[in-house]
Amino acid sequence: MCQIFLPQNVTRCSVSLLTMSKTSPQEVPENTTELKISKGELRPFIVTSPSPQLSKSRSVTSTKEKLILASLFIFAMVIRFHNVAHPDSVVFDEVHFGGFARKYILGTFFMDVHPPLAKLLFAGVGSLGGYDGEFEFKKIGDEFPENVPYVLMRYLPSGMGVGTCIMLYLTLRASGCQPIVCALTTALLIIENANVTISRFILLDSPMLFFIASTVYSFKKFQIQEPFTFQWYKTLIATGVSLGLAASSKWVGLFTVAWIGLITIWDLWFIIGDLTVSVKKIFGHFITRAVAFLVVPTLIYLTFFAIHLQVLTKEGDGGAFMSSVFRSTLEGNAVPKQSLANVGLGSLVTIRHLNTRGGYLHSHNHLYEGGSGQQQVTLYPHIDSNNQWIVQDYNATEEPTEFVPLKDGVKIRLNHKLTSRRLHSHNLRPPVTEQDWQNEVSAYGHEGFGGDANDDFVVEIAKDLSTTEEAKENVRAIQTVFRLRHAMTGCYLFSHEVKLPKWAYEQQEVTCATQGIKPLSYWYVETNENPFLDKEVDEIVSYPVPTFFQKVAELHARMWKINKGLTDHHVYESSPDSWPFLLRGISYWSKNHSQIYFIGNAVTWWTVTASIALFSVFLVFSILRWQRGFGFSVDPTVFNFNVQMLHYILGWVLHYLPSFLMARQLFLHHYLPSLYFGILALGHVFEIIHSYVFKNKQVVSYSIFVLFFAVALSFFQRYSPLIYAGRWTKDQCNESKILKWDFDCNTFPSHTSQYEIWASPVQTSTPKEGTHSESTVGEPDVEKLGETV
């Protein structure tokens, strides 16, 4: 039968533990993996329940192996924690994630494209260290004052980086590798340059990788437990918890959820075919996995968003990204608390766009540069007197003498209060979006001019979006959603997330559209004053208090939209097709004639890529041979190799291929989760070399391992100045450049002795603000809502 299509949990293995002592290869037990196939009455089937010995044989139990693991732990601690206090200034995206930790401590609301867990951890560590939020993490190169516990905050990702290395060792043991192979592969991860760099700073990647590694380990342990035992339940729940933690750190964790899901489907297929498993137990397998892998992670994910919302209770720069309903729950918000309910002729109103974060219909005494040259009409995100419009009858010659409600279908004009110009449209193209189906919107008029038909708009209430029966017939503040149809041309008042040029303060464009997405033509009245109504007597309305799930849903809608919008070019961005080949890195920091440049260990990186490629070719070749009637190897070691390689390469694919579908900025560090799965696959390549290819000549495999590690260590040592911001010379730098690695060798001196000369006084050359930082969500200012750093 075809071993490459069998689930991991059908194998039986009792792997002996190689120790650090001089154990002879001949002492290693052979054929320690079992595959049990029973003959049923009608068909043979695979017995899927693991034997009780399997989990024990794949665990770290011997004293000698514990010493190996302890040695790896110390090695990882030395590499990850070495001189973590240097540099003593803000590095790369510490600008953002240190800044977010600050806002947690201050309790001010912010917007970011990532879930909150890792940021909450940094805030918690910073708070424990006495960080008061005064230091702003404003730009790369800003030096930390003494009262900022940045070293303690960096210890968190460093420690989690160490934990990831240990998890890799335990995962490989749980999936059937021998200790020597686990030790080698773990050592390669310890000295993997990119992973070392990413774990030294206040960045989200190290916590995320740790939780992904915890998920993979827990799942591999779960697969080798006897079903429905205490250990089976424990590892099952541990997998679900780890999944929740991974997804709560970065949405990349959702790809890990998909990986678990696909392998679970694989496993359940064979469980259904196992005639020794009753229907009741099959049902139990389905239910327990569904609860552990879907319900538990979802609950954990929502819990951290609940904490996020409980901590961020004050109005902050992120409020501009949210709806008024959401912002009304924040302390110190500027959202109007109450408004007269009934809107009528003569009402002084502010009108908000419903489906973008652009804000209020706005005009100011500045003219378009081009087009009609008339007064600008825009969307503006902040409360301002230029947002106020007076509702007028389209053909009235006198002011109303009593309250006249604004009904569905009525024709009106909107008069800008401060400039006395009317909302206006005509058959001219807008200043930015020069589409045939969009017309310019302006404010037009002058003293003594009674207006013209191009000022007329018809109110059309969106009954399905308005919240009360009365709001579906008459326009009511907050409760009624409506469209404004231009009476002359039939176009609808429209806005989309397109910024006007600097001459319009980069505010959001407003047009009149005959086509386009209908929700972008929805509006509602936020504030309403009318001379014939009294707030003390007449009905008033306010924003409803949103539920937790409504707030979470809105947060996710904004996160998704902002993430998609991170499309600006970045000098160090790279395309996913270049990542497996390590074609270029990222400059993280440059100062004091030192540099931090994010680049991987090419020895490990390229070997992982080659291993995946070669196994893929082997897989296709094996399937073709099988279709032609040739058999498959039934060797237990080869069987386990095929299964584990399929599992881990599937993880590599699921974390890598979605990058090709993303239109946002992408960077080399987005490949790290895929690389982790690739290194796990590489471990099984080493295992097949050690336990199968050179089964009887393991001195050869030991020699290969020592040589491979020596080359990888040499690469790590050579490029370590780019990890630790160490001393390097210009010649050493230039000699180390390969491919498109664009670290700046002019940063370094001709001789290392010059560092001593520069030591006093210190000379600095700080990069321009934002030059090297990955774009995320910026802080909207008065005129530039949502501009990214």
Image (tube, rainbow, N blue to C red):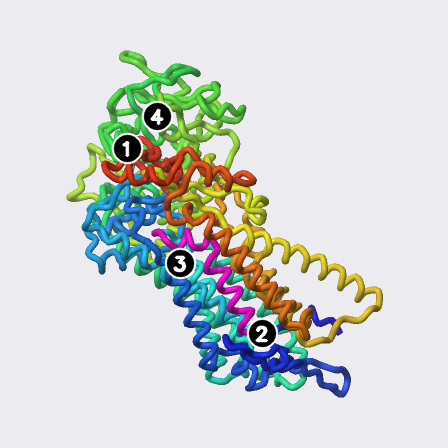
- Nearest to viewer (mark 2 / mark 3): 3
Task: Name the N-terminal-most of marks 2 and 3.
Answer: 3
Q: CA distance from mark 4 to mark 2?
A: 76 Å
Q: Is residue 167 left or right of residue 316?
A: right
Q: CA distance from mark 2 to mark 3?
A: 27 Å
Q: CA distance from mark 4 to mark 1?
A: 28 Å
- Nearest to viewer (mark 3 / mark 4): 3
Q: How far from the left and from the top, in percent, is residue 555?
A: 38, 50
What range is drawn magenta here? 179-202
> Extreme right residue here?
628
Magenta includes 185?
Answer: yes
Q: How far from the left and from the top, in percent, is residue 307?
A: 30, 60
Rate crowding at label 3 as few (under 14), some (14 to 19) or many (20 or more) other CA atoms within 10 Å. some
Q: Quadrant of the C terminus?
A: top left
Q: Is residue 518 left or right of residue 380?
A: right
> Extreme top residue here?
448
Rate crowding at label 4 as few (under 14), some (14 to 19) or many (20 or more) other CA atoms within 10 Å. many
Residue that numbered label 1 is attached to: 782
The amino acid at mark 2 is: Gly
Nearest to the observer: residue 193 or residue 436: 193
Nearest to the observer: residue 65 or residue 155: 65
Rate crowding at label 1 as few (under 14), some (14 to 19) or many (20 or more) other CA atoms within 10 Å. few
Residue that numbered label 2 is attached to: 176
Q: How far from the left and from the top, in percent, is residue 108?
A: 25, 49
Residue that numbered label 3 is attached to: 79
